[in-house]
Image (cartoon, helix red, strand yellow):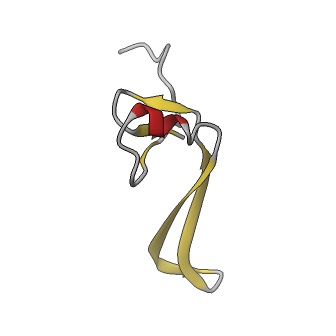
Amino acid sequence: MPSEAGHRLYVNLVKIEGVDDPKAATFYLGKKVAFVYRAQKEVRGTKIRVIWGKVTRRHGTASMLDI
């Protein structure tokens, strides 16, 4: 069984349009972002759902961000 020490649990990776280099990705550090998607089941009168998060750091050398 591998150790979970050093693993970042509950972290999602996000790719933002137009962010292609690390300098552009650093602009979003500390900013709040919303992942908006459409679900099949209607809840409270709408099918649109939103997941909010805060950008905590860059991921790798590409433009991926940790939320």
Closer-to-camera residue (55/8): 55
Residue shown at 39% from the left, 55% from the top: 17
Residue 51 coordinates in the image, percent (x, y): 58, 58
Q: What residue is shown at x 49% (from left), y 15% (from top)?
A: 6
- Residue 56 on image: x %, y %: 59, 34
Question: Is 34 drawn above or below residue 9 in the view shown?
Answer: below
Write the residue at 46% across / 39% down.
24
Q: Percent from the top left, x then y, of residue 23?
A: 46, 33
Number of numbered discs visible in the structure rendering = 0
> In the image, is residue 27 above or below residue 36?
above
The answer to whether 39 appears left or right of 53 in the picture is left
Specify the quadrant that holds the C terminus. top right
Is 8 in front, or is 24?
Answer: 24
Q: Position of residue 41 (x, y in %)?
A: 48, 79
Q: Residue at x 51, y 66 (%)?
A: 36
Residue 1 lies in what quarter of the image? top left
**Closest to the observer, 45 or 62:** 62
Residue found farthest to the front: 23
